[in-house]
Image: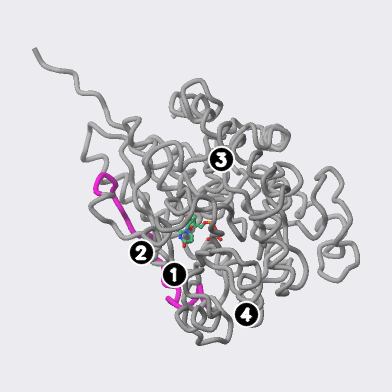
Amino acid sequence: MEEKQERRRRIVLIPAPAQGHISPMMQLARALHLKGFSITVAQTKFNYLKPSKDLADFQFITIPESLPASDLKNLGPVWFLLKLNKECEFSFKECLGQLLLQKQLIPEEEIACVIYDEFMYFAEAAAKEFNLPKVIFSTENATAFACRSAMCKLYAKDGLAPLKEGCGREEELVPELHPLRYKDLPTSAFAPVEASVEVFKSSCDKGTASAMIINTVRCLEISSLEWLQQELKIPIYPIGPLHMVSSAPPTSLLDENESCIDWLNKQKPSSVIYISLGSFTLLETKEVLEMASGLVSSNQHFLWVIRPGSILGSELTNEELLSMMEIPDRGYIVKWAPQKQVLAHSAVGAFWSHCGWNSTLESMGEGVPMICRPFTTDQKVNARYVECVWRVGVQVEGELKRGVVERAVKRLMVDEEGEEMKLRALSLKEKLKVSVLPGGSSHSSLDDLIKTL
Ligand code: UDP
């Protein structure tokens, strides 16, 4: 008897070209693949993930564009995104058209939908042209989305006034976004407010998308998720923390230095502060030196990630910095760490973080309290929530001085207050674990999404 062959359904995913966007998109890809979908990843030449044997199950295609390779670095992320979206709108249509032609030759397969990062909004027009269902993927959280939308509305109503640094309203609470202050809104350190608003206007517009997937958890931001649902009027699927949903393929764009795990193995439980500011934070040399002095005087052990090129105007190597600190046994500095492994290590007692959303979820997923030092955009929103809503960390504001660093480290690593934050962080960890298990909110949301797809 002839067996009826089931048609395989393929999903085309378009990540934004940044570490913090590629990783969750690949975690989503793995989760969908485990549910039986075939995966195509469409990337540009910028910050792209190289196909490897761990990613052999996925098809990778390149969206052609002719932007200079130096554009990302020279323009900064905001202007770059605006340019990239303009550049790719037409070329992605061609790319998708070709993919559909190829797929016609494989009758047992069809394209189920296109899932695009909210900042790669050029994909919407292409998918619309070919009548493919479109799903937005937000790698940030619902509160950050609400802030971006509020910024667009504020801009339309009052112009730039309340958003500009130095306008005198920085400490005021933003109406309806309590406990966020104007200074916590996701303005960029890389471009003027006008440019950010330009990007946000497009990324907040759902266009003809039929749903939104979001890497967050219901218990973390119920009211922002409800707001999002009402605002967009399409189904919202909060299915995070995605790194806890499925064992993700390796997605690091930089080489992870595993030797820091050997170093952590030699340290006492909860005795190390892990410091990492993500994939694109930049620091002034004087800030790094103040951090170093503060760490020395805190008397705590530390594992510090300093990416090459992340200290402005300095050629100082990690080895030179560590030797200047004159406490070789108390510290370890690497260019890039296997962060999830580090945060899961019993020797780590706290995380000094820029509060990128992935880092925040990874920290909360391991019950590690945080010292928040946001640098740009949604990191400021996340930091405020870590301190005032989830209460699993403290934010360091103002000028970074040795004494401020020492005090913040001691608050978390030595004081009773740190112990209380640790307990809250552990309880949050349990809630996040439950959310991705059968019956949990993210687990159910993923099931609902799969049914829709
Ligand atoms: N990361 C890492 N090793 C490091 C520093 C960061 O693997 O030494 C990873 C981290 O686990 C996270 C991502 O890089 O998944 C950074 O994303 P996030 O959203 O936290 O910040 P961004 O880099 O986008 O500012």
| Residue 285 locus on image (x, y percent) | 61, 82
* Distance of label 1 from label 4 (alpha carbons): 16 Å
Q: Earlier in the sequence, mark 2 or mark 4?
A: 2
Q: Residue furthest top?
A: 1
Q: Is the residue under label 1 in contact with that under label 2 (CB below 8 Å)?
A: yes
Q: Residue at x 23, y 31 (%)?
A: 108
Q: Earlier in the sequence, mark 1 or mark 4?
A: 4
Q: Earlier in the sequence, mark 3 or mark 2?
A: 3
* Distance of label 2 from label 1 (alpha carbons): 9 Å
Q: Residue 214 has which mark?
A: 3
- The answer as to whether callout 4 falls within 8 Å of ligand 1 is no
Decide which of 415, 148 is in the foreground and name it. Answer: 415
Q: Is residue 353 magenta?
A: no
Q: Is residue 59 magenta?
A: yes
Residue located beneath label 4 in the image = 289
Q: Earlier in the sequence, mark 2 or mark 1?
A: 2
Q: Earlier in the sequence, mark 4 or mark 3?
A: 3
| Residue 355 locus on image (x, y percent) | 62, 56
Mark 1 is on which residue type? Val
- The answer as to whether callout 1 falls within 8 Å of ligand 1 is yes
SS at circle 1: strand
Mark 3 is on which residue type? Ile
How many neighbours does mark 3 have within 10 angstroms: few (below 14), some (14-19), or many (20 or more)? many
Please report the bounds of the magenta region as a residue range. 56-73
Instruction: From the image, state whether disc 1 or disc 3 is nearer to you.
Output: 1
Residue located beneath label 2 in the image = 259
Residue located beneath label 1 in the image = 334
